[in-house]
């Protein structure tokens, strides 16, 4: 190849990479296809063409591109990993696992392949095997963000004593041994909560040198799948409320201080409800939604929500101040398009339009023909407090400090500050009116 051809090829590849990084995937695909007409055996271009097709959810085209790559070079490690990802999207789990293992066979320290292999087992609830592979990924690359976050999340559903040499598991297990300091409702007070968080943070600081955990919501799951991703897809694409959501009600608690949000986290841990309802605590990061600190309990009828509200209110009045308790229907975003929808007094006024069922069916066909990756088994949250939950509480404390809620100091002034949460919160600065 002469120098002019080499220069032209490099220029085009640089442009291709630029288009891809700019998320202009269609233009990137057009250029990639044109380059492959000229350099049809170039393994870099073949593999990159597959990656672009993956980004466009063209699963079969991606499959073909990665297979062509490996036909040209059967030791192209990344292509095996990418082929595994493609098979995962196609729902062919065994073939995905086979290709991840092939990539690892060729490169023993391939962290991303170990992480991808782990997610296959994780999605199907085979947590012990998933943990083994997440920990291998982190041995290869201790700063692998996806492997870190995936392992931390998994420990919300599965208790393990394996891999004590893994710092995440070690920190998680030590935190769970601290937990008995708050073992009933009567122990939920500011000094105990503060002591607990400080002890946990010391464990984290000693065991975890660099961990970035991005979650801001703490869930207590009962194993039921509310299928919210599907329902949001229906709403976002067609601006209609799914039929299921007309039977979804929430007991919503709004709070003024982060110290109160942390207390309600402990209340939710101990709160016994007739149907073991799903519940969550979170900071409000949606720019268009008012409020800073919220907690929700999901119910399947107004009557159930009333019972749950009464049971919950007994404990809220004992341990919290300045809170607001309401019963609402569905997601907040639905009320923007259908004003009054969330008001339980109007449940007979805003009702499901049976014509919407046709659009729901279209979404179900789209989902069935789309990616099959990540269709996780929904497991019940374990009762113990986890590393994940403590890290999220530190994210809440970061948020509180940024918005000027000085109640964070009642819990800890020396918490684990999150630069990630700080960046997000500062972008929402115009929303805050903290008093």
Image: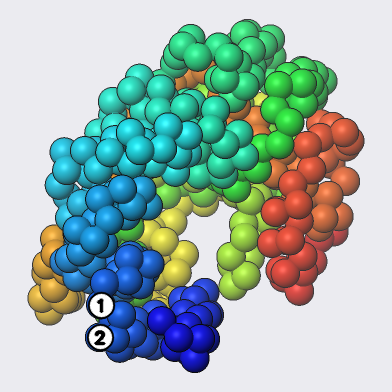
* Pointer 1 residue: 40
Label number found at residue 258: none
Label 1 Cα crowd, 10 Å radius (few <14 / some 14-19 / many 20+): few
Q: Nearer the viewer, residue 268 or 398?
A: 398
Give the residue displayed 83% in from the left and 49% down from the top.
401
Q: Look at the image and tell me in which quarter the N terminus lies.
A: bottom left
Quadrant in the rendering for residue 187: top right
- Where does the image place residue 347, in percent across and percent down from the top left? 31, 64
Query: Is 336 rendered above or below residue 191?
Result: below
Give the residue displayed 57% in from the left and 36% down from the top.
141
Q: Secondary structure at mark 1?
A: loop
Q: Nearer the viewer, residue 160 or 23?
A: 23
Query: Is 231 rendered above or below residue 239?
Result: above
* Pointer 2 residue: 37
Q: Nearer the viewer, residue 325 or 264?
A: 264
Residue at the far front: name it: 2
Q: Give the CA separation, mark 2 to mark 1.
A: 6 Å
- Where does the image place residue 352, in percent across and percent down from the top left? 21, 70
- Where does the image place residue 223, in percent across and percent down from the top left? 30, 32
């Amino acid at each position: 190849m002469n120098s002019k051809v080499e220069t032209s090829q490099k220029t085009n590849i640089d442009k291709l990479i630029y288009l891809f990084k700019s998320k202009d995937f269609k233009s990137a695909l057009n250029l990639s296809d044109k380059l492959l007409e000229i350099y049809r055996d170039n393994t870099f271009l073949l593999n990159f063409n597959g990656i672009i097709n993956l980004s466009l959810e063209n699963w079969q085209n991606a499959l073909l591109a990665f297979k062509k790559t490996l036909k040209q070079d059967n030791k192209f490690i990344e292509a095996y990993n990418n082929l595994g990802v493609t098979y995962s999207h196609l729902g062919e789990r065994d073939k995905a696992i086979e290709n991840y293992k092939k990539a690892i066979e060729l490169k023993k320290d391939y962290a991303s392949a170990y992480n991808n292999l782990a997610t296959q087992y994780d999605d199907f609830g085979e947590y012990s095997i998933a943990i083994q592979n997440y920990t291998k990924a982190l041995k290869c690359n201790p700063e692998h963000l996806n492997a870190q976050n995936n392992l931390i999340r998994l420990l919300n559903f599965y208790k393990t004593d394996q891999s004590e040499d893994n710092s995440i598991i070690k920190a998680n297990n030590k935190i769970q041994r601290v937990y008995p300091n708050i073992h009933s409702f009567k122990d939920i007070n500011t000094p105990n909560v503060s002591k607990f968080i400080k002890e946990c943070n010391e464990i984290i600081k000693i065991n975890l040198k660099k961990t970035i955990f991005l979650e801001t919501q703490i869930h207590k799951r009962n194993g039921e799948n509310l299928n919210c991703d599907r329902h949001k897809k229906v709403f976002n694409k067609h601006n209609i409320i799914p039929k299921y959501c007309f039977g979804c009600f929430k007991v919503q608690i709004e709070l003024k201080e982060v110290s109160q949000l942390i207390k309600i986290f402990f209340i939710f841990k101990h709160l016994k409800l007739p149907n073991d309802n799903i519940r969550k605590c979170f900071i409000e990061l949606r720019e268009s939604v008012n409020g800073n600190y919220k907690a929700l309990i999901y119910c399947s009828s107004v009557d159930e929500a009333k019972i749950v509200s009464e049971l919950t209110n007994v404990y809220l009045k004992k341990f919290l101040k300045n809170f607001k308790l309401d019963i609402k229907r569905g997601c907040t975003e639905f009320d923007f398009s259908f004003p009054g929808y969330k008001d339980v007094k109007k449940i007979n006024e805003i009702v499901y339009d049976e014509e919407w069922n046709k659009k729901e069916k279209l979404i179900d066909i789209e989902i069935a023909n789309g990616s099959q990756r990540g269709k996780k088994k929904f497991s019940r949250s374990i009762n113990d407090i986890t590393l994940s939950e403590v890290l999220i509480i530190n994210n809440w404390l970061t948020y509180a400090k940024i918005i000027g809620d000085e109640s964070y100091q009642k819990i800890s002034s020396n918490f684990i500050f999150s630069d990630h949460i700080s960046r997000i919160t500062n972008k929402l600065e115009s929303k805050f009116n903290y008093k």
